[in-house]
Image (spheres, coloured by chain):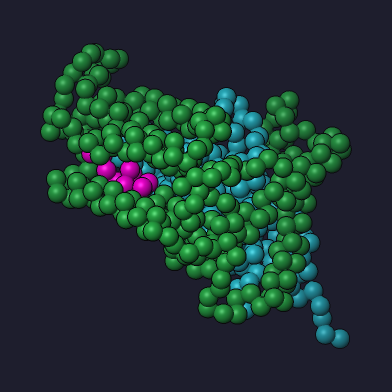
Amino acid sequence: MRNLFNYISRKSPIHDLTGATKLVCLLLWSFASMMTYDTRILIVMPFLAFGLFALSKIKLRDVSFMLGFTLVFMVLNNILVFLFSPEHGVELYGTSHVIAQLWGNHVLTLEQLWYHLNLVLKYLSSIPIVLLFVCTTQPSEFAASLNRIGVPYAISYAVALALRYIPDIQKEYNDISKAQQARGVEMSKKVSLLKRLKAASTILIPLIMLSMDQIETVSNAMQLRGFGKNKKRTWYMARPFTRWDVLSMIFCAGLLGLAIWSNLSRGTRFWSPWM
Amino acid sequence: MNKAVKLIVAIGIGAALFFVCGRFIAIPSPIPNVTINIQYGVLAFFAAAFGPLAGCLIGLIGHALIDFSYGWGIWWSWVIASAAFGFVLGLFKGLFNPNDGGFGGSKIVRFNVTQLIAHLIAWGIVAPALDIVIYAEPANKVFLQGLVAGASNIVTTAIIGTILLVAYAAARPKKDSLRQE
């Protein structure tokens, strides 16, 4: 079975951080890049992000598929934003420097290009960090980390169960799908959309029935082992924090603090040289 | 206690199903590069069978895992919209409960009206509003995206969700099917 979440085991300072630290840093970092449109901060973050990426010994080649996918998504989103609202930048920044005339009475402005630059920087500052998290955190440590940062353990356990059963369900789906195809169920482009959806449900019905049985079995097994009896539980994959864990969390918190401070002190999320 | 453990397992396995359907089962649509999301039929099924908490968390966990596995970071506004759909549908579970056995005419209509409203809330209000607040994207773009996604999700939920619920209810013992002699 293909390694789904693409965990790559290497020896590096990033791998040594605990899962909980990486999750906290990921959240702080992505909130920082989500909140601010201050270009002075956004321009630094991609460099930091790619620097950390180099530190993790994960090669670009390892993640080229995911990276390519994301870049296509980024370009498409930019094109859509531009087509739907070519003067969005003027609205946001409140100034207008016309460069060229476009279709209708729309104009191309420096502000619009500036807004797109900010969008691209936002992607570039968060993509490497997400990839880094996905590639350097073991899925089973991920569930333990959720509990560590305050998510109730019942919910963390549900996430752990989901990660555990994804490969099983994938395999069951493939088996059922092959069996139904042998009986002549067609899901390709050759038949109409409605037929394809109906074909999908001939696979989903046995899959759901199987899953309902599985829910029964697993929950019985968990009850027999006393799941949910105590207020807390321990995790096999949990590790104690080290100095580097604390330092990285402080650094990311500082980054988020900077983003919030920049927004609050100027009273706006946006920044442009013309403001 | 029994119910709580079962709910947790249902959330876990439901999220795994949502993930597999959303990530690996691509049904080609007439529009190039657009595939149909059948996972909302599965989510609707679980929300109807297990209630609002399960619906909300399956949408949240399943959708977040899909976003993670693509590597583009979590697009929070849409993840929350998925959770909102599961939650709203689960809230009205009493109207079309499949667990009593029997999922016929009036329950099918009530289920589909509810899922229509739940999808409209999720993709017509929650997703675009959060896109504007969080990502400062242009309003007309996000509303159009939301409506397109919402419309296709309504169709797939109507077909797949209904078929799944009918099949599941048929396999359940009917309420009042036993009489004391």
Residue at the image point whose x is 35% and y is 35% from the top = A46
Q: Which chain is green?
A: A
Residue A35 located left or right of residue A222: left
Main secondary structure along the magenta-highlighted residues: helix
x, y percent for residue A228: 60, 76
Check if residue A164 falls in the magenta segment: no
- Image quadrant assignment for residue A122: top left
- Front-most of B51 and B18? B18
- Front-most of A208 and A247? A247
Residue at the image point whose x is 76% and y is 76% from the top = B176
Residue A220 located left or right of residue B145: right
- Image quadrant assignment for residue A128: top left
Residue A263 visible? The answer is yes
Q: Is residue B108 above or below residue B128?
A: below
Task: State which quarter of the image contains the N terminus of chain B.
Answer: bottom right
Where are the magenta residues, as a range?
A: A29-38
x, y percent for residue A111: 22, 26
x, y percent for residue A264: 18, 50
**Chain B color in figure:** cyan
Residue A192 located left or right of residue A147: right
Q: Is residue B136 above or below residue A140?
A: above
Check if residue A34 falls in the magenta segment: yes
